[in-house]
Image: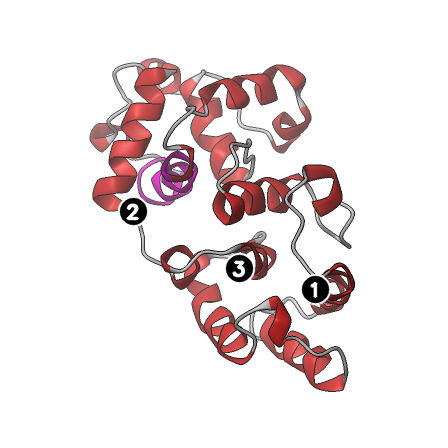
Amino acid sequence: MEFLAGKIVEFYRNNGRIFPWRVKRDPFRVFVAEYMLVRTRAENVVVPYTKFISEYPSLEALTPGIRLKQDCVDAFSSLGLIRRATGFYLCLEKLLKTGRVPDEGERIEELPYVGQYIRAAVRVFGFGIRDTIIDANVVRVLARFHGLKIDDSLRRNRHFTELVESSVPADNFVHYSYGLIDFAAAVCRKTPLCDSCPLCTVCRSAKTKT
């Protein structure tokens, strides 16, 4: 697993994408970005994220009411995800009541429509706490690496989640986590570029051509 983590961290340092939520990170900005990023291409999130953060650069800048609710609708309608706007607004209301974005995993998941992915992403990217991020990108890369059939149900498979957890390094886990996402986008795509993959010599799927 050290070989995998080392190669992914190296890939990120050499080829990592630059997004505004990666350049300036704090728990609130990470939460906003990750809520928008669920099942959405990162490139499509740049404009609505930047516009929203320019209006509300911090949790303290939020004021619940009609304007904030409309700004939530505008942000998510531009992504074609208007139904998600209500959940986002409810999250912001709850954060305003508590006065902070929580760093405890269970408390993050108490927010409306927030699951394992956002919880882990906020902890890793927002607070610098080691946690395990599992999304479609992670499933694709690590399932192939271990020679497993790619299936969304793997997210709930105990054996697979343990494999994912064991792959997260003690250090550089932020770069590793961003690296997995970018590696999946650039190399380990739905149609993988195995010939240019730095993991091909040890990847079970690459070896068996599956």
Picture layout, residue 36 above or below residue 143: below
Amino acid type, residue under disc 3 in the picture? Ala
Question: Viewer-proximal residue, 17 or 205?
Answer: 17
Please tell me which residue lies in front, 117 or 150: 117
Q: Which residues are magenta?
A: 175-190
Which amino acid, by three-letter code, is at mark 1?
Answer: Phe
Q: Which residue is mark 1?
A: 88
Numbered disc 3: secondary structure: helix
Residue of label 2: 16
Chief SS of the magenta region: helix
Query: Disc 3 and disc 1: Cα gap in Å?
Result: 11 Å
Report crowding for label 2: few under 14, some 14 to 19, many 20 or more residues within 10 A (C-alpha). Answer: some
The residue at which mark 3 appears reads as 33
Residue 204 image offset from top left, x and y in percent: 38, 14
Q: In terms of secondary structure, where does tag 1 sit?
A: helix
Q: Residue at x 61, y 76 (%)?
A: 61
Residue at 73% over, 68% down: 89
On the image, which quarter does residue 80 sit in? Answer: bottom right
Residue 171: x percent and y percent?
38, 28
